[in-house]
Amino acid sequence: MTLSSTQSVFKANQISVKYQRQDILDKLNINLIDGKITAILGPNGSGKSTLLKALSGLIPCHSGKVMINDKSLSHINRTDLAKLLSILPQSPEAPTDITVNQLVSYGRYAYSSWFNKNKKEDNKQVKWALAVTNLTELAESFLHELSGGERQRVWIAMSLAQNSDYLFLDEPTTYLDIRFQFEIMQLVKNLNQQQGKTIVMVLHEIQHALNYADYILLLNQGKIHSYAPVEEIIHSGAIEEVFKIRIKQFTENAENHFIICNNG
């Protein structure tokens, strides 16, 4: 089950990625849905993080191409690409002796050059990114003073400072305590609904994908098993088939919620 061809701005056409002659991704076709949250799910080793890196141009495709506005990523220079999309990798690292404001400011590198230094606009974007991630009061705090959830919000704020339409997140809740996981997922939802960001995120937690994403792209052994709206994915039984689990649905305050159960 996959989405039919649409007039998507962001596309992947027949992309394959190999590592030491082994196929990691095999001829994938993807049309991202603009203005929505897409969660990439799949068992360990299915190629989730590799796909996100290929879509963002961090790694080359062995064949096929990724395109934005009918232009191949390989023909877009890194500075211009950073204005189109931002990516937050797994477990990013930075010196702990820098402040929140300093790290978020790094997101403006694509707009800075010897010939174009618009400090007023840079400061405006940094302040906005801090505000929407609820970090304004922590702007002068050092990274080592923050909780895991706060640090992850700082990294997301840095990505937002790039002012790109596309935000790619690679397992943004990894290693976070459960309450911080929900905090980050709600932030992602708010960025989509209130700021109009198109968000693609790799998730390890199936439940988060079901409760916060609009679409799910399900990978299995380097191929797309299914790509459809969450409700369609659930009713198709695709997740149960791939992960060998059960999904239970319940309604609270007129909203649907999902929990994952053992298949035994």
Image (tube, rainbow, N blue to C red):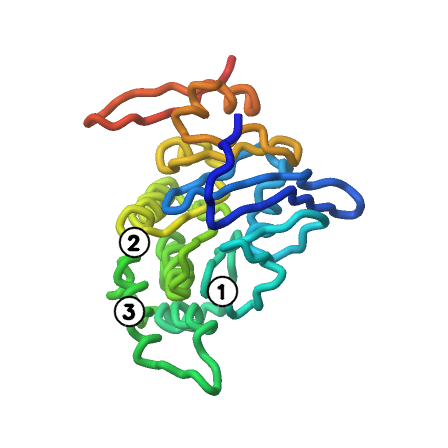
Q: Quadrant of residue 261?
A: top left
Could you tell me residue 90's position as x and y percent?
53, 52
Counting residues from the start of the chain, the first of labels 1 and 3 encountered is 1
Can residue 174 be seen? no
Q: Amino acid at mark 1?
A: Ala
Q: Amino acid at mark 3?
A: Lys
Could you tell me residue 243's position as x and y percent?
55, 24
Q: Secondary structure at mark 3?
A: helix
- Residue beneath disc 1: 82
- Residue beneath disc 2: 195
Instruction: Tell me the mark number nearer the camera, choosing from 2 and 3.
Output: 2
**Distance between the alpha carbons at the discs numbered 2 and 3:** 15 Å
Counting residues from the start of the chain, the first of labels 2 and 3 encountered is 3
Q: Amino acid at mark 2?
A: Gln
Q: Residues within 10 Å of mark 1 (few under 14, many from 20)?
A: many
Residue at position x 45%, y 48% in the image: 172
The answer to whether residue 188 is left or right of residue 204 is left
Can residue 173 be seen? yes
As drawn, 82 above or below 65: below
Q: Quadrant of residue 135?
A: bottom left
Residue at position x 43%, y 54% in the image: 166
Q: Quadrant of residue 139?
A: bottom left
Instruction: Tell me the mark number nearer the camera, choosing from 1 and 3.
Output: 1
- Residue beneath disc 3: 127
Could you tell me residue 82's position as x and y percent?
49, 65
**Distance between the alpha carbons at the discs numbered 1 and 3:** 19 Å
As drawn, 193 above or below 116: above
Counting residues from the start of the chain, the first of labels 2 and 1 encountered is 1
